[in-house]
Amino acid sequence: MRSRSFLTVFFYVSLTFALESSSWSLRSALRHASQKRANLNRLNSRAIPTGWSYVGCATDGSARALSYSFTSSSLTQDSCIATCDSLGYIYGAPEYTNQCYCGSTLANGLGVSTASAECNMPCAGNSSQICGGNYRMSLFQKTSSVATSAWTLTQACAVDTSSRVLQGYSVTISALTPALCQSTCASQGFTIAGVEDGSQCYCGNSFVGGTPATASTSDCSTPCGGDSSSTCGGAWRIQIYIASGATTTATTISTTTTTTSALASTSTGWVLSNACAVDTSARFLQGYSVTTSSLTPALCQFTCAGQGFTIAGVEYGSQCYCGNSFVGGTPATASTSDCNTPCAGDSSSTCGGSWLLQIYTASGATTTATTTSTTTASAPVSTSTGWVLSNACAVDTSSRILQGYSVTISALTPVLCQSTCASNGYTISGVEYGTQCYCGNSFVGGTPAAASTSDCSTPCGGDSSSACGGAWRIQIYTASGTTTTATTPSTTTSAPASTSTGWVLSNACAVDTSPRILEGYTVTTSSLTPALCQSTCASQGYTISGVEYGTQCYCGSSFVGGTPANASTSDCDTPCGGDSSSSCGGFWRIQIYTSAAATTSSSSTTTTTFTSSSTTTTTSTSSSAAPTATVTAPYFVLYGDQATSGTIGPPAVSAINGFNVFALSFLLTEGAYDKAAEWASLTDAQRQTIKTQYAAAGMKLIVSAFGSTDSPTTSGANAITTANTMAQWVVQYQLDGIDVDYEDFTAVNKGDGSAEAWLISFTTQLRSVLPQGTYIITHAPVAPWFAPNYWGGGGYLKVHQNVGSIIDWYNIQFYNQGDTEYTTCANLLTQSSTVFPQTALFQIAANGVPLTKLVLGKPATNASATNGYVAPSTLATCLSTAKGQGWTGGVSVWEYPGAAASWIATVRASSWPVGN
């Protein structure tokens, strides 16, 4: 979508309306000029990336040399190679005028250099360039990649084992491709890479247990998570790639007990306490673990000591386990001869065996055993550096033992939760029920009770091979050097804390409801005190503050739904998060404080003489309150950022009859501009009058964030902070929600996942402040971002997979993406071009996004966008066709006044006629 110009300054209401109008007109002209420049740097503008060079004309065949392909009627060398680069491949090759092939290996004996004259076909999109020939590729190679100095497929399918033939490093990546695995291994210093079972990547410099046995190529048929047109091994079947110049070796494990290597000497201060013990699937040592191809007993001891543990165990050549006690009881002793696996970092010494552990204890330490249930559960995954598993399974409560910060992430792992907590300033993290992450600096309610380890058996959303707690069961990790403390609630009701100057306790305990009795502003903080809540409310312009359930602060200037009912003072006994000697309400119980200068009241009607069309009339309105419900599909969304004569803020209801949502554009990372700034300039009474008029017409008012000139990820904006600021703006200015018009093309095109991660964090935090069902949250991505296996970070399919459930719908921009893209009903609804494959409406739905959430976004006029315009009558036909196939999403349009009541009446005529 369009946005303000970089030359635009913050909007301020001028003294005269005439001056305001001329100022807005000037800014509008500057904004539109800037937008034409911004549109030049979108998806359809690519060049051959740095680091690629032309290899020459090479052979291809029906079996194909390269694994990924697409066709395009506008193909050039530039667009082909840029696409291959964005997907992480190291070879790119245009062929036969309009075909582009990508890959990281030259397969099937093809890709052999041939006479340059055999590549003789001009590119479909640029006749001055050559795009291969008949089974001939114009082959390019990425020469600067650390992963590619060229890797070759040395074993198309090999048998992996439970101990893993590559033990140097491993990672599970949902968007895996061979090229991504190769670059990952190269970055870790390894020269052998192996892909397995679609999403698993293994690295090493030699094979453990001997050269792996060859399996049938047909066994390696699992599609790669990041490219379903290519294979990434299979179940216990691995495709192996070796960096050029590397020599493969095998570490052969002795199968006899007469050649057992001697036990390695230990580090100073450590003693061998059990030469060979039986380990279990639950692991006897659960504090910390790591797998390394450089393992020795001394290295494991050093690692455990660095993590604060006093017991170290080496197992199966490359595995190191740490703890301060044995989980499940003292391990059974095995024959010393069974611990005969050579250490990966010193083959003259042994490092345990298969499920056999050599145990070392720090001098002066006393080993203890923690008895647990005999049933087993998945072991927690390795932790981030500096974090240790402090409780393998604990009982959580309805009030939550960690209350500092929480988030639900569908791709959760313990490491992701740890980094999330650390980034928010917390030293304790807990994973629960597969997808829930909790953070804090102390335990609320006392040290949590231990539960059976088997209760923590729910697979992690981001790694199903590991466990992330269970139902009301939490795995707890602590940052090294942290001393955990517990906040134990008093058994008697704490007294309310003293108030800030100018505030008085007006109700010691009242019943809160859903929706909340104070809806002006809300925040949750683990440092809550009544005084902190009071100062927060005062800074937001409110005169009533309420503390609830220890960490929740609510603000308002009147009570929603009438004066709250009184509750027993004993119900408000939850200690304040920031002062355990004082109470901060209870479960649905709120302590209410009032500014001494204010008079509390319940919501009532007031009278004002302002309307959005500047016509002076008398209107009865209600005082401000948060929205109570969202609209339902179909959605008819109108954006606007242009100043219009005679109107400050959104257009009059009559001017846009037929729409049910108007988006004030734009709220940027640096503040409000254009229509959003106009809205903020109005008085509370003026805004409330307009809101009442819109509500009576069944319309919602939201703000649109970012736009095409704001790049929050690239500019380094903090996702959490930005979400909090924008959510607070929505609440403060009494809007119904927010539209996320994220257009940071630089970040998405990088393909490293940073854009997707930013959006997921931003949306999650946004929804935590703006509850679903009360506030609208929509996104407005460009359609190509839904293309599967196209974007290195996963694009909007990745975003939807993680936070789609908390996004109400998508206002998809089917424009500004190529002259002929999405300009016919067929191209828009059922079959997009091969430039951006699988991005038509029903193709997006087929890839997992509900039809009810897909809104067709179009420009109002030819002048409203660079391309993609469809006449309203044609769009009406498309809507009718889609509706007949079960679609009910609706239409969004950029922008007012180019689109108004007559435009939407035409568009809806054949599907959802206005007025019916």
Image (cartoon, grey):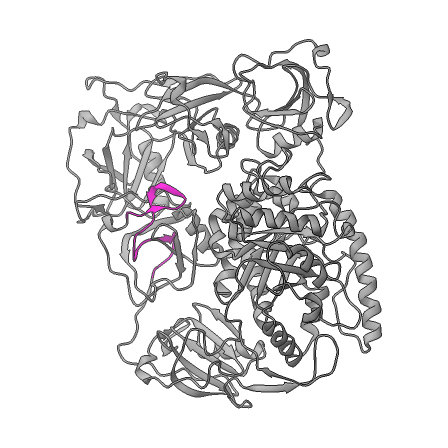
Q: Is residue 464 magenta?
A: yes
Q: Is residue 261 left or right of residue 748?
A: left
Residue depicted at 37% across the width and 27% down the height: 345
Residue 371 placement (x, y as % from top left)? 17, 49
- Can residue 268 be seen? no
Q: Is residue 824 left or right of residue 777?
A: right
Q: Is residue 311 left or right of residue 244?
A: left
Give 349 or 525, whichever is nearer the viewer. Answer: 525
Q: Is residue 545 magenta?
A: no
Give 773 or 9, whichever is nearer the viewer. Answer: 773
Residue depicted at 30% across the width and 63% down the height: 397
> Does residue 482 sit above or below 208 in this rendering?
below
Q: Is residue 885 left or right of residue 588?
A: right
- Can residue 65 be seen? yes
Residue 123's quadrant in the figure? top right
Residue 138's quadrant in the figure? top right
Residue 125 placement (x, y as % from top left)? 74, 28
Residue 38 placement (x, y as % from top left)? 74, 48
Residue depicted at 50% across the width and 47% down the height: 849
Give 378 or 23, whichever is nearer the viewer. Answer: 23
Residue depicted at 30% across the width and 28% down the height: 162
Residue 803 placement (x, y as % from top left)? 48, 52
Looking at the image, the residue that sits furthest to the top is 115
Question: Tag count in the figure?
Answer: 0
> Does residue 333 sit above or below 595 in this rendering?
above
> Does residue 201 sit above or below 884 in this rendering?
above
Question: Which quarter of the image is occupied by the C terminus?
Answer: bottom right
Magenta stretch in the rendered image: 457-484
